[in-house]
Image (cartoon, rainbow, N blue to C red):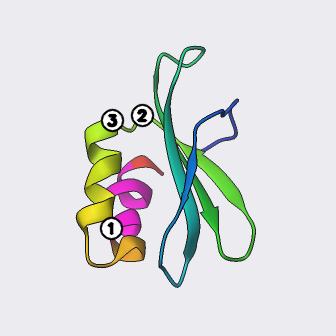
Amino acid sequence: MARKVKFNGTMYAVHSGSLKRVGWEYNQEESRGVLRAEFVKGAQYDYFPVSKELFTSMFSSESKGTWFAEKIKKELE
């Protein structure tokens, strides 16, 4: 699911043609992990539920944009 929620997590810059920064935190109000994605064009979206393990697996992927499209966008929208 993608919608805006309260987010206080740390954002990390990534090298990608589509993503600018990503972050993750456990959201107490939602009782689940939330991934925030900021795109190069400026839009920000929150995706949940996303486990910390899934989020950290992005950093070992060769293409962050492809990882995001396959693991997050395809599964949660």
Q: Position of residue 14 (x, y in %)?
A: 49, 70
Q: Nearer the viewer, residue 5 or 60?
A: 60
Which circle marks residue 49 in the picture? 2
Magenta-drawn stretch, dominant element (helix, strand or loop):
helix
Q: Which residues are magenta?
A: 67-75
Q: Which residue is mark 1?
A: 67
Helix, strand or loop status at disc 2 = loop
Mark nearest the camera among 3 and 2 is 3
Q: Residue at x 42, y 34 (%)?
A: 49
- Residue 72 highlighted magenta (yes or no): yes
Which circle marks residue 23 in the picture? none
Three-letter residue code for mark 1: Trp
Verify CB contact (< 8 Å) between mark 3 and mark 2.
yes
Task: Looking at the image, tell me whether mark 1 or mark 2 is earlier in sequence order.
Answer: 2
Q: Position of residue 22 (x, y in %)?
A: 53, 56
Verify CB contact (< 8 Å) between mark 1 and mark 2.
no
Verify CB contact (< 8 Å) between mark 3 and mark 1.
no
Judge the density around disc 3: few (<14), some (14-19), many (≥20) Cα neighbours within 10 Å.
some
Q: Which residue is mark 3?
A: 51
Q: Residue at x 47, y 78 (%)?
A: 15
Q: Residue at x 75, y 68 (%)?
A: 42
Q: Position of residue 69 (x, y in %)?
A: 40, 68
Residue 4 sits in which quadrant?
top right
Three-letter residue code for mark 2: Pro
Q: Residue at x 55, y 19 (%)?
A: 30
Q: CA distance from mark 3 to mark 1?
A: 15 Å
